[in-house]
């Protein structure tokens, strides 16, 4: 019986596919030009491209502000004040996971959200990745609409 329940949990976490509201293809393509951010800002590309957790949506916040829920194969682009410390957070199984980065004016940053197996449901984490890896990943994804978090 325990094996059946465990298998069902694994299938739920790995199977299915969550979706979120998306921006137009035009807006997505514009963001994928990776232009420098405006004025004295920094740009944050926050993306999720992992296979694990296809059925899960996970919230993303920047400095406590809801950016939106992630789903497989999406990214968000948000500009923040440059030359400042910013906290990127994602919900996980028991508590939020945070990443703090010090941004520089005029630079884009790439943050990958990854899904990890948890005790009851899948958790999530965030990590800063290099520009090459980030641009390659984002170029294959769609731009999600901002603004709706579950919590």
Image (spheres, grey):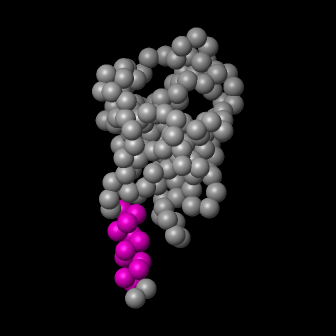
Q: Position of residue 51 (x, y in %)?
A: 35, 53
The correct choice, above or below, for 23 with respect to 89 in the image is: above
Residue drawn where x is 62% and y is 61% of the image:
94
Residue drawn where x is 43% and y is 33% of the image:
145
Q: Is residue 81 left or right of residue 1?
A: right
Q: Position of residue 31 (x, y in %)?
A: 40, 23
Quarter of the figure that contains the N terminus: bottom left
Would residue 1 be visible to someone looking at this image? Answer: yes
Closest to the observer, 98 or 55: 55
Q: Position of residue 17 (x, y in %)?
A: 33, 54
Q: Is residue 70 magenta?
A: no
Closest to the observer, 133 or 106: 106
Residue drawn where x is 66% and y is 38% of the image:
64
* Quadrant in the picture for residue 3: bottom left
The correct choice, above or below, for 144 with respect to 116 in the image is: above
Magenta portion: prevailing SS class: helix
Q: Position of residue 128 (x, y in %)?
A: 54, 39
Which residues, given as a range, are shown in magenta?
3-14
The correct choice, above or below, for 101 with respect to 124 in the image is: above
């Amino acid at each position: 019986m325990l094996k059946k329940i465990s298998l069902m949990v694994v299938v739920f976490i790995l199977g299915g596919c969550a979706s979120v509201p998306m921006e137009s293809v035009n807006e997505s393509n514009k963001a994928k030009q990776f232009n420098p951010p405006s004025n004295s800002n920094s740009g944050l590309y926050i993306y999720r491209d992992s296979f694990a957790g296809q059925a899960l949506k996970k919230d993303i916040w920047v400095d406590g502000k809801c950016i939106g829920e992630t789903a497989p194969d999406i990214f968000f682009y948000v500009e923040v004040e440059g030359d400042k410390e910013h906290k990127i957070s994602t919900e996980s199984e028991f508590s939020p996971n945070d990443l703090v980065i010090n941004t520089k004016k005029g630079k884009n940053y790439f943050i990958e959200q990854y899904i990890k197996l948890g005790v009851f449901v899948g958790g999530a984490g965030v990590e800063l990745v290099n520009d090459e890896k980030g641009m390659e990943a984002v170029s294959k994804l769609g731009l999600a609409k901002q603004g709706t978090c579950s919590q």
